[in-house]
Image (cartoon, rainbow, N blue to C red):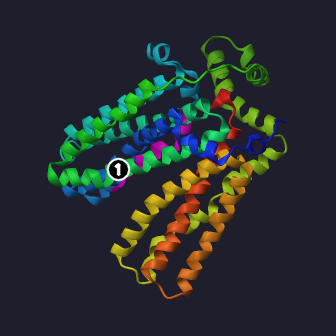
Amino acid sequence: MTEDPARAAPARSWREALLVYTRPRVFAMIWLGFSAGLPFLLIGPTLSGWQRDVGVERSVIGFFSWIGIIYSIKVLWAPVVDRVALPLLTRWLGKRRSWMLAAQLVIAAGLLGMAQADPVADLALVAWFALLVAFGSATQDITIDAWRIEAMDPEFQGAMAAAYVLGYRIALLVAGAGAFYLAEGASWEVAYVVMAVLMAGGIVTTLALREPDHVAAAAACELEARVEQALGASRRRGPLGRALAFLSDAVVAPFVDFFARNGREALLILLLISLYKLSDITMGVMANPFYLDLGFSKTDIADVTKIFGFFMTIAGAALGGVLVVRFGIARPLVLGAVLVALTNLLFAGLAVLEPSLALLAVVVSADNLSGGIAAAVFIAYLSSLTNQAYTAT
């Protein structure tokens, strides 16, 4: 079994840890995060706002929410992104950047198509363009994650995640409030055209990046050969044999590799992954109803959770990235879990004490700061578990 990557990262000085955000690839993650976050609302809440504004029935708007399932099933074509080369683009840009650029162009084209379609008269066309945007966006997520893991060592993954969170959060503001402002001042069509143009930031970043080195590890190749033999794929010829070999190498081998590298600890790792932020997720769903029950106004909740929450999440993620570089992954990973659990206790204090806007701001700030730290460190930990041969999968 290999050494636990959470314990393997070397500790650095505070100065070295802070300077991690001056690295070009870390800075590039801001733009990639922006490019990843921009389409998300444009095929969700922003699109539903446009549809309702022009009189589309609520039942139809609700049906459009199924488009978001594309993000949940992207694992189905992730092995294709990991293995298949795109004609011309892969030769020009490399394996990761070629798929990234193709996905970004698909997103931009889909947004332009949505801008030109009538959401009432061309409902089916809008749905197809929205599906195109969702597919491009999910594929872009796959390639960005793969590039991020391959481009930097595990000790820098927390900083990469923090930069990504910053770009993603800014994109949510632009695609949410920004799109509504544009629609109010001009039109929804103009808003979506502007959003499509903003994808140029991600496209330019992709073209400016350097493709990570791809070295096929001998151990991975040997493992794939053994898996093919065990599944009988190596004994078959023709299209069926090639299909079985592809599924064996791209789908089965990554799972076999994970359990082979981690041995008995593999199940404990999966349990940790499942439970790490469970309390934060379950409490988060009930946060807004809890605030309303305490008597806070909708304006108070919006001001505190959106403004304080936005900046404290970014600050927490940035701090998490610094902690990973300074101390390695293991100690910040434990710290993140403890902080997330402890800050949940602050909500109990908010319920017992006399509610005040200042206290709400403290609780929300602490909760989002700890959540940002935990998110950045957790992404660094997950990245350290990934075999470089299967980063997209």
Q: Is residue 204 left or right of residue 162?
A: left
Quarter residue 16 falls in: top right
Q: Position of residue 118 (x, y in %)?
A: 19, 43
Residue drawn at 36 percent across, 50 percent down:
41
Magenta range? 62-77
Q: Is residue 358 left or right of residue 392?
A: left
Crowdedness of circle 1 by 10 Å Cα count: few (<14), some, many (20+)?
A: some
In the image, 28 versus 383, the foreground residue is 28
Mark 1: amino acid: Phe
Quarter residue 337 falls in: bottom right
Q: Quadrant of the C terminus?
A: top right
Q: Is residue 39 visible?
A: yes
Q: Position of residue 137 (x, y in %)?
A: 42, 38
Query: What secondary structure characterizes most of the magenta part?
Result: helix
Quarter residue 200 falls in: top left
Q: Residue furthest front?
A: 15
Q: Quadrant of the N terminus?
A: top right
Residue drawn at 58 percent across, 76 percent down:
346
Q: Is residue 48 visible?
A: no
Q: Which residue is mark 1?
A: 64
Q: Position of residue 235 (x, y in %)?
A: 75, 14
Magenta span includes 318: no
Q: Position of residue 107 (x, y in %)?
A: 36, 35
Q: Is residue 60 left or right of residue 95?
A: left
Q: Residue furthest top?
A: 238
Looking at the rendered structure, the secondary structure element under dot 1 is: helix
Residue drawn at 44 percent across, 47 percent down:
168
Question: Could you tell me how many numbered marks the image carries?
Answer: 1
Residue drawn at 63 percent across, 16 percent down:
242
